[in-house]
Each structure stands twice: as structure tokens, then as C-alpha cells.
Image (tube, rainbow, N blue to C red):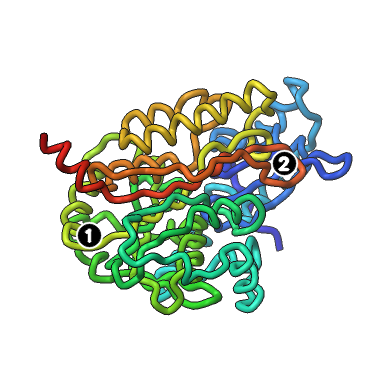
């Protein structure tokens, strides 16, 4: 039986991209909340979707399209599309709210955050996954150096294959012994349309090769001072950046993996507001006596039709690389305000770097005087039918030299 027809349909904030399949053009809908499953519609449906603004009835949508000569469509076809999108959870209606509440109850009732992307972007079978990770990052124990001065790394949130594996292999060297780490603070890029700058969970991150435990005492300490910090905890459900970071940590450190503090960093972290200031001050306080390894799981530019943006020629690709490297320079120089501004350069063409919030947060939280090394940077094609480019960087961060401290004192 068909679901009830929505009087004035309103499309939720979902990602739309045009995909070519043979001679056919499709518009692909993806839900950043992970409530609705991806759906593909004929490309002309884009014209109808543009009018799903919550102001027009199905009859008014059809009439407007016909009068403007944009698209010839029957009222029954508009109603069928409305019903289909409502049933799938793409409309802002009671059906979506019911689906969201069910997903929220399920997630909040779990003690362990189950891996969402196993068998999607990496193998879910433990043996196959271990083989893939061992090929990308062989000899995990040899990557640990007693007395290491490494205090953090930046890696893209990509499966460890191809170019991303090469970059991770070069970056993840000279790491501190797990016994010298009290907590790994993971700052993950978060594309969830949340209102708050950060979201924290006390759930352990499950992986097919074993759990990565969250530092519950730190979560309680943060929540006591920042009552809002877990208000949007549901954002962790689709946090691919945090899931891949946890997976890599588990491979590197095995059963000795230190406790973690997984933090989803959303776009609101790029704005100046009391919540951001309170978070930074509180983090400094609760981490004051702890030995921290900072793990930033973030990427730079996502551009081109694969991401719903214009195609780039040679000049556009040069602009992309120049902006990415300028952002990296600001991070190396510990200049978060400059980094935020540079993330917005040419954003009409390139969009804002997907990891901007995580990168700016890292620049604010890393210890004063940290040293940063760019291990590698590359622009890559994400694959798929539509062309696209993404900027990937690997960086290591080290504690200040004693000489640096003496120079600062002078």
C-alpha cells in the first residue's frame, strides 16, 4: 500500500550528484544522516526536486513546470515521485522523522558503535581486512619508536589502498610507544548537518579486528563542563573519518591500543561562538596532565562533478593544489584563523575543503610551538563515472624542541 501523499513536499538537505551510466544520466541522492539509502532517479527529476521546497503542492509543482516549458509531466507522475521519496526517507515529513527516531533509539541503545562501512569501503571479513591492512602498513611494531617526539598525525579518511595506502605508509612511522600515550584524541571531519561544532560519544568503536576503547572518564569530564557535547551524539553513527581512524589505530597497536577520545568536528567549528571557545578551554584543562597522541582524520579539497561541482581544467586543478598547500602552510604555522580564511578561497569553484573544521580545530588544540612536517600531498581521482579530484595530505606533528622553548623565553 502506498504511503500517504505529502501536501507540500519538502526535500531534506541531501547530497545530489549527476552520474552517467552508459548513455543515461541519473541524479543520485545520498543522505548524509544515513537514514535513507542512496537512490538514483532519471536526470530530469532534478528539475522537479528543485521545486520540493515545502511551499508548493504537487499540482502547483506540475503546473509551474508546464507553464514555464521546463518539463512535461503529469500530476500522477509528480505524486508518484513524492510518494517514492517519502517512503525512502528523503522528504522532511513524518515518515522521515519516524525513521530518524528509530535509528536514534537503536544507536543510543548500543554500548559499542558498530562499524558502518565494513563490506562497503573495506572488507568486513577479519582475515581479508588484516591482509589488506598488512599490505598497506606492514610491520606495525617496527613503526613504533621508544622516546618518539611524534605527538600527532594527519591522514585522509580513505580506505588503505592505492595512493592513500602509500601516503599512510610514509606518514605512520616513528610513532610513540602505546605505553607512553594516555589517550589518542581523534579529530574527525564530519559532514553531518549538525548545529553544534563538535559531537562526542562514550561508545567504544567496534572494528572487525577488535574494539577501540573510548576513554569514558574523559567523556564524563568534558560532559560535566560542556552539557551540549553529546547532544548530537548520533553524528557518530555515520562518522566514516572516525571509523577509519579507529581501524588504523587498532591495526597499528593491536590489543595495546590506547584509549581514545573520538570527536566529530562539524562546520560550526569554523565560526566564532561561545561553544567553540568553551570547548577549547575545557579540552586544554582536561588534557593538561595527559600524554596525548593527536590523530586528525581529514581531507582537503573535494572538487569536480563527482562532488556536484563544476569540472576543472588545468587552471582549476592548479588553483586546487595551491589552495590545499596554502591551508597546509597555515596548519604548519599554527594559524587557525588564516587557515579558515584560506579554506574559503575559490570555494564557489572548489567548495570548502571537507576537513576544514578538523584542521582548524587541530591548529587550535595542538601544543604551542609544535613542529609540523608535510610528508606528502597528492591530488587523486576518487573513481566512479564522473570526474573528480580530492586533495590528500599526510603530516606528522612533533613536540617543540627544548631549544625552541629557550628561544621563546628570550
**Mark 1 sits on what residue?**
222
* Residue sitting at x 25%, y 37%: 273
Residue 88 coordinates in the image, percent (x, y)? 64, 56
Asked which secondary structure carries label 1, the reply is: helix
* Residue sitting at x 50%, y 41%: 354
Q: Is residue 371 visible?
A: yes
Query: Callout 1: 10 Å neighbours few (<14), some, many (20+)?
Result: many
* Residue sitting at x 54%, y 36%: 301
The foreground one among 49 and 43 is: 43
Q: Earlier in the sequence, mark 2 or mark 1?
A: 2
Residue 297 coordinates in the image, percent (x, y)? 46, 52
**Is residue 116 depicted above or below 385 in this figure?**
below
Q: Is residue 115 left or right of residue 389?
A: left
Residue 292 in which image quadrant: bottom left
The foreground one among 224 and 12 is: 224
Asked which secondary structure carries label 2, the reply is: strand
**Real-space Cα distance between discs 2 and 1?**
42 Å
Mark 2 or 1, closer to the camera: 1
Extreme residue toward the left, this view:
410
* Residue sitting at x 41%, y 49%: 396
**Is residue 129 depicted above or below 26 in this figure?**
below
Extreme residue toward the front, this view:
403
Residue 262 coordinates in the image, percent (x, y)? 37, 60
**Is residue 81 depicted above or below 89 in this figure?**
above
Residue 392 coordinates in the image, percent (x, y)? 55, 43
Q: Is residue 34 left or right of residue 310?
A: left
The foreground one among 70 and 328 is: 328
Query: Callout 2: 10 Å neighbours few (<14), some, many (20+)?
Result: some
Which mark is on residue 27?
Answer: 2
Amino acid at each position: 500500500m502506498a504511503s500517504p501523499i505529502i501536501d507540500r513536499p519538502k526535500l531534506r538537505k541531501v547530497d545530489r550528484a549527476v552520474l552517467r551510466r552508459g548513455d543515461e544520466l541519473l541524479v543520485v541522492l545520498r543522505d548524509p544522516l544515513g537514514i535513507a539509502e542512496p537512490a538514483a532517479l532519471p536526470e530530469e527529476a532534478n528539475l522537479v526536486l528543485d521545486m520540493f521546497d515545502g511551499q508548493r503542492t504537487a499540482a502547483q509543482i506540475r503546473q509551474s513546470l508546464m507553464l514555464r516549458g521546463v518539463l512535461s509531466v503529469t500530476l500522477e507522475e509528480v505524486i508518484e515521485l513524492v510518494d517514492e521519496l517519502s517512503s525512502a526517507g528523503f522528504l522532511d515529513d513524518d515518515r522521515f522523522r519516524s525513521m530518524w527516531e528509530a535509528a536514534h533509539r537503536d544507536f543510543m541503545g548500543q554500548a559499542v558503535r558498530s562499524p558502518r562501512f565494513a563490506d562497503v569501503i573495506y572488507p568486513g571479513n577479519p582475515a581479508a581486512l588484516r591482509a589488506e591492512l598488512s599490505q598497506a602498513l606492514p610491520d606495525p611494531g617496527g613503526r613504533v619508536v621508544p622516546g618518539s617526539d611524534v605527538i600527532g598525525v594527519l591522514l585522509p579518511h580513505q580506505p588503505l589502498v592505492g595512493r592513500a595506502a602509500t601516503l599512510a605508509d610514509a606518514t605512520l612511522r616513528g610513532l610513540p610507544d602505546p605505553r607512553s600515550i594516555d589517550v589518542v584524541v581523534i579529530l574527525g571531519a564530519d559532514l553531518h548537518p549538525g548545529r553544534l561544532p563538535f559531537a562526542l560519544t562514550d561508545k567504544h568503536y567496534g572494528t572487525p579486528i577488535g574494539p577501540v576503547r573510548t576513554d569514558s572518564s574523559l567523556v564524563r569530564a568534558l560532559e560535566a563542563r560542556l552539557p551540549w557535547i553529546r547532544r548530537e551524539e548520533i553524528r557518530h553513527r555515520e562518522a566514516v573519518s572516525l571509523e577509519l581512524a579507529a581501524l588504523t589505530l587498532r591495526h597499528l597497536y593491536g590489543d595495546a591500543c590506547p584509549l581514545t577520545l573520538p570527536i566529530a568536528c562539524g562546520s560550526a567549528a569554523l565560526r566564532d561562538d561561545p561553544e567553540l571557545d568553551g570547548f577549547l578551554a575545557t579540552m586544554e584543562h582536561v588534557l593538561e596532565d595527559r600524554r596525548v597522541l593527536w590523530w586528525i582524520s581529514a581531507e582537503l579539497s573535494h572538487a569536480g562533478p563527482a562532488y556536484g561541482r563544476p569540472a576543472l581544467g588545468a587552471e582549476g586543478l592548479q588553483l586546487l593544489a595551491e589552495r590545499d598547500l596554502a591551508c597546509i602552510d597555515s596548519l604548519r604555522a599554527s594559524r587557525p584563523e588564516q587557515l579558515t580564511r584560506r579554506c574559503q578561497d575559490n570555494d564557489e569553484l572548489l567548495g570548502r575543503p571537507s576537513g576544514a573544521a578538523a584542521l582548524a580545530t587541530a591548529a587550535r588544540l595542538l601544543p604551542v610551538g609544535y613542529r609540523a612536517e608535510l610528508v606528502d600531498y597528492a591530488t587523486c581521482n576518487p573513481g566512479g563515472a564522473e570526474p573528480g579530484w580530492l586533495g590528500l595530505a599526510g603530516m606528522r606533528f612533533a613536540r617543540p624542541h627544548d631549544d625552541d622553548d629557550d628561544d621563546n623565553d628570550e
